[in-house]
Image (cartoon, rainbow, N blue to C red):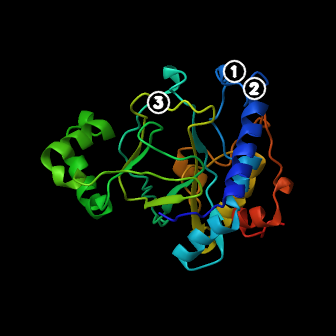
Amino acid sequence: MFKDILNGAEVETALDKLWVEIESRSEAVSRSDPSTWDNGWQTNGWGHDDFLWYVRAIPNVRKVWEQLHDTEDVIVSFDGANIQRPWGLNPEWRGGAGTLHYDRRNREGTPDGYIQGFVNLRPTSAETGGNYVVPRSHLHYDELEEWKKSVPEDQRDNLSFYKIVAEQRPEIFAEVINAHVEPGDVFLWTDQTLHQACPGRGVGPTEPEVSRAAVYVTMSPIEKATPEVLEERRLCVELNTGNGHTAHHPMSVRGRNWPPEDQEPPETPYPIERLSEAQRLLVDGGGGK
């Protein structure tokens, strides 16, 4: 974990931009009135907006991955964010649990090796929910992948398979972390690390503000991306299309036909000209200008 990567002013600016985005998706939602937060609340399907791009391009956020990869030439994932409402005010807002998983792509010809995670904007606790991470599970990646091939097909889904692993190899899960992260922190793991989102516990938070706001980010050295992938990334921005926890992989790794045929214009276009110079560098190194 990298502490205090964002300062207090940057956290507040990010939250303000988040709420501009939330309120723009439904005129019936008002930040100042939690009783309206059921009126067309939408926080899914993100890839490109002023909120996400502001966080991605904060200089200290970029520096985290520059240091990790030992290069200033990096490109960023077009990912989304995990936004949760204070479910102590409404139990129906309590988020559901994810399932343990890796984010390894294993695409022939394209290297993996992502260091991924999130930029945190709200304090996390047992009540808010957050992330479970299994330390050192990356050391068992190859073993578990081979093991999964040996179990019956109807037990190869993540929920069923990792129940088997927990029963037969409990030591792998002996030190599971429920990450406690403060506003401005960046929490990271590798793409071979088991992790999952977890819901809140207890009575639930009641502060009239989003109870969780985490922007998912990964960055790759631009040298890992082919010219074709860099062109895809430019089109992703124009079509307001996300690519998940990937930066240098082609869109086909997401199970999509690419380039899209007969693509309808996006409901909320995001012209690439809207990006600042610093943001554009994270798309393709500025090479498409």
Amino acid type shown at disc 2: Ser
Is residue 236 among the parts visible in the rendering?
no
Q: CA distance from mark 1 to mark 2?
A: 10 Å
Query: Which labelled disc corresponds to residue 249?
Result: none
Other-residue count near label 2 (Cα within 10 Å), few / some / many at <14 / 14–19 / ≥20: some
Residue under the point 49% across and 63% down: 114
Furthest residue in direction left, as rendered:
168
In this figure, which residue is indicated by the disc labeled 2? 26
Whole-percent x and y of residue 26?
75, 26
Nearer to me, 273 or 1: 1
Whole-percent x and y of residue 220?
57, 67
Amino acid type shown at disc 3: Gly
- Which of pointers 3 and 1 indicates the residue nearer the eye? 3
Quadrant in the picture for residue 98 = top left
In this figure, which residue is indicated by the disc labeled 1? 36
Whole-percent x and y of residue 166?
20, 45
In this figure, which residue is indicated by the disc labeled 3? 204
